[in-house]
Amino acid sequence: MSYLCSVRAPVQPLRFDMTYRRDEVRFGPPMLSRLPSALYLLGALSVEIAIAIGQRSPHGSWLFHYVVEQDPARVMGIRSFAACLLVGAVAAVLRSGMGGVCIRKDGVEAREVRGWLVPRVQRFQWPQLERIVLDQKARVALDLWDGSRAFLPAVKDRLLLSAALEKVAAARSIPVRGGAGLDEIPEGE
């Protein structure tokens, strides 16, 4: 009688290659920098509401007279003006949310909105960084290999940004000055 010998493949543990990992972590601008655009949007919405109320007011009221009866004498109609005001307010809210810091696999991206139209985006690759400075009071600084220092824009949650940068610095052997230390960093991200 012959016995068939079966060769077994070694058992490998389950691998979770399909798990989700974020390619980037974003940190938005602080709420204080978004406050003016939010107030602008609130004002534009109140103008829209006042116009809607004025169109439905009684014919002898002051608001009906201002919104409806005086409208043909204006260079721009009040409804067109309110629409332009609302579009500008929505654009201001979107623009104020464009700033912040984005940590990616290949480096750090600093986004600042300066001036009227042109946003400023600076990208720093991990090999460019000589040191990450976390002991600055207001902003996080990056010491670059060419001897210059770049400051990241202010973000809503500075402590979480510092913790994320500290984790990446430990993984990539980038020196860190300041910070909480890896034992103090909460897990979860």
Image (cartoon, helix red, strand yellow):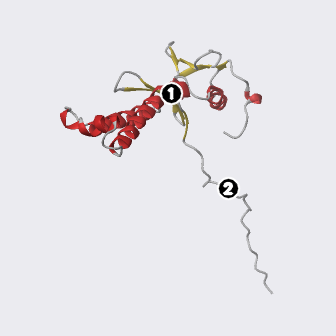
Q: Residue at x 65, y 20 (%)?
A: 176
Lower sequence index among marks 1 and 2: 2
Q: CA distance from mark 1 to mark 2?
A: 47 Å
Q: Quadrant of residue 154?
A: top right
Q: Residue at x 32, y 36 (%)?
A: 82
* Placement of 3 over or under 168, stated as above or below: below
Residue type of the residue flagged with mark 2: Arg
Foreground pick, 18 / 161: 161
Find out whether the residues at labels 1 and 2 contact each other: C-beta distance under 8 Å: no
Location of residue 56 in the rendering, given as x and y in whole percent from the top left corner:
35, 46
Q: Which residue matches tag 2?
A: 15
* Placement of 125 over or under 22, stated as above or below: above
Q: Which residue matches tag 1?
A: 35
Callout 1: helix, strand or loop? helix
Within 10 angstroms of label 2, few (less than 14), some, or many (20 or more) residues?
few
Q: Quadrant of residue 83?
A: top left
Location of residue 54 in the rendering, given as x and y in whole percent from the top left corner:
35, 40
Residue 30 visible (yes or no):
no
Furthest residue toward front = 60
Residue type of the residue flagged with mark 1: Leu
Residue 76 visible (yes or no):
yes
Location of residue 88 in the rendering, given as x and y in whole percent from the top left corner:
35, 33
Location of residue 71 in the rendering, given as x and y in whole percent from the top left corner:
23, 37
